[in-house]
Image (spheres, coloured by chain):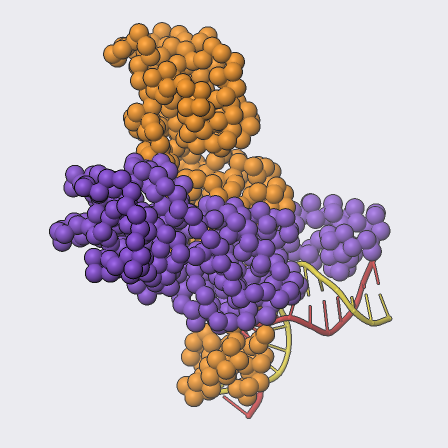
Chain colours: A orange, B purple, C yellow, D red
Amino acid sequence: MATIKDVAKLAGVSISTVSYALNNHDKVSLSTKKRILEAARRLNYQKNGIASDLKRSSTRTIALIVTDLAGPHYAELVKGIQEVALSRGYDLLACSSLGGEQSTAVKFLTEKRVDGAIVLAYNIPAATLRRAAREAYPIILLDREIESPHTVSIEVDNEAGCHMATEHLIEQGHRRLAYVGGNPMEPLNEQRVSGFKRALRQHGLEREGQLHQFGMFNRDNGYAMTKMLIAEGNLPTGILYYNDEMAIGGIQAFREYGIRVPGDVSVIGFDDIELAQYVRPALTTVMQPKYERGALAAHLLFQALDGKPLEPRYRLPTRLIVRDSVRAPAGHEGKVPLRSE
Amino acid sequence: MATIKDVAKLAGVSISTVSYALNNHDKVSLSTKKRILEAARRLNYQKNGIASDLKRSSTRTIALIVTDLAGPHYAELVKGIQEVALSRGYDLLACSSLGGEQSTAVKFLTEKRVDGAIVLAYNIPAATLRRAAREAYPIILLDREIESPHTVSIEVDNEAGCHMATEHLIEQGHRRLAYVGGNPMEPLNEQRVSGFKRALRQHGLEREGQLHQFGMFNRDNGYAMTKMLIAEGNLPTGILYYNDEMAIGGIQAFREYGIRVPGDVSVIGFDDIELAQYVRPALTTVMQPKYERGALAAHLLFQALDGKPLEPRYRLPTRLIVRDSVRAPAGHEGKVPLRSE
DNA sequence: CTGTTAGCGCGTTCAC
DNA sequence: GTGAACGCGCTAACAG
């Protein structure tokens, strides 16, 4: 593998001259430059980006760190990030935090392989993030908030979104409600539960609300937890799922048991992933602005890299998207006026 | 930012000792090691991965290069790659080739930032790939074949898949057929067209087949091209789209014009992306084994990195997935026996 | 004005 | 347990 040395030798000049020539530092005469370029071409020379990053101590690269590259709903997020990064001439890498402390994500977070990171990976411990963030290495968090001077959180108003969704169910006449989520320790899950609970409290339904929180936040677990819920009997008439993926898994479980959605059970998701509008019934869900979130994240990251001071926390609004997975329960046709207590 | 030097100073040992200690090269006494670890912790030392990669001249990282990180149907592919990479202790990065020669993808391909790459990015010129691939830098191609000793292609049998799909339409009684694809110069597009044409030829329908090839391979373009097709009049009764995304765009266009699918026009896609089963009508399509393809790609990449000789080309079969977007055209109810000529 | 020398960035590893 | 060379490219300072 040819190095800059080989090019220098072949062109009959010093290494530095080659470097200058290749980087257009008009210090080199045109004829020499031509000779050097020709030598580089002949040797199929490619610079070692690692060496040059090391010297420059900057990579002009940012990382998007997600739990699972194969996950859903990153698509739109990525789009926003990608566009901003591209316009700034930065490179964007995506990597996954599967594999825990040995994961690519942690390696990239801690080993200065990139200039900054955008993180949406609930399985990375806060301690790791706190250790990683520093002056010249800002981190934008999309899934939690941690106190650290070099960290910015962009949150979606999960609490309000779930509150709104729950009120929607109540408004339709639902009284026996459930929330189905994953690991209750995840901050996002907590926020969503809390919106659910607040709506219940406000409408005097506290006692009728079931909470099911366990495991992962994916379709399979939505399916599994819904099956458990069915097996338990005493099915609620309205269910708020942690996210669309879990809701879609849940709908699948209901279908297998011949339980109709929304005829027998109403279902609401969260996120508004692309699939939500395509599944049958089309999923009523809480939309979060994904593209905007990505774009904002990238924007803030560059602000931080430019040394500009930032708010530690941004919050984006959600919106209820009404589709076909919610209907008034039997005996409750027509809207029921909300009564707060 | 603390470097290994600072740790050495604080611990009162030499740099090399710190390195050995941190890498568990049991050359260091336990007490020294403990002192070093303590010093590192106090300084919040994080090694510079770039420096270490430079020295080791290996990154234990492979890249997945795709046209657009936000694209569809990579999800399953990624899953296969990710699992194999993880099991080998390698890191996986995803990056996009948006941005042409300046893109992250090209940078990663040419600058030795990773040990090997899996490429599914039709917009990277073959010359770039040929220049990048070398002994110690194998490249697995998922979207084309190029002659180069350090390159392996894993292709899907596009020709046979499209042939099968076209025969399916013919078998249902369709006679006026069209193929809707993107840029005709893309090798994948060529292969797919060729399967379409062969089926037409075999059944004496050559003259009735329309070819529409232009632009990108995405949903928007499927939508746009279908609108053009509608505007032209003389609508065929059966359409084979380059891929599911384009087909979904096409169905959308038909819906807007009140043209029923499959009542008035039958539609077949290619890929079997997740959405295909959720859109209405559920999309009949040609399935390619995505997970297997990803896993095979990663597997072969590691074989190459281990210096094992490889076939230059692998080919995976496709399968027709019959859903609801194809029906016999008016006046042709019931299966029509195929007659080859 | 052209081109060279020399040292740097930071961690790894061989020889002692 | 240490010293020093090394990986490779960048660039300030200097010489021709």
Q: Is residue B108 above or below residue B37?
A: below
User: Whole-percent x and y of residue A7?
Assistant: 54, 81
Q: Nearer the viewer, residue B86 or A36?
A: B86
Q: What residue lies at 48% left-to-right and 22% top-to-bottom?
A: A226
Q: Is residue A310 above or below residue B129?
A: above
All told, the count of numbered labels is 0
Q: Nearer the viewer, residue A318 or B163?
A: B163
The quarter holding residue A72 reads top left
Left or right of A41, for residue A283? left
Q: Nearer the viewer, residue A68 or A223?
A: A223
Q: What residue lies at 49% left-to-right and 58% top-to-bottom?
A: B315
User: Whole-percent x and y of residue B118?
Assistant: 51, 58
User: Whole-percent x and y of residue B213?
Assistant: 26, 59
Q: Nearer the viewer, residue A215 or B314?
A: B314
Q: What residue lies at 76% left-to-right and 52% top-to-bottom?
A: B24
Q: What residue lies at 47% left-to-right and 41% top-to-bottom?
A: A71
Q: Is residue B30 visible?
A: yes
The quarter holding residue B144 reads bottom left
Q: Is residue A316 visible?
A: no
Left or right of A304, for residue C9? right
User: Whole-percent x and y of residue B260?
Assistant: 20, 39
Please identify the quadrant where the C terminus of chain B is shown.
bottom left
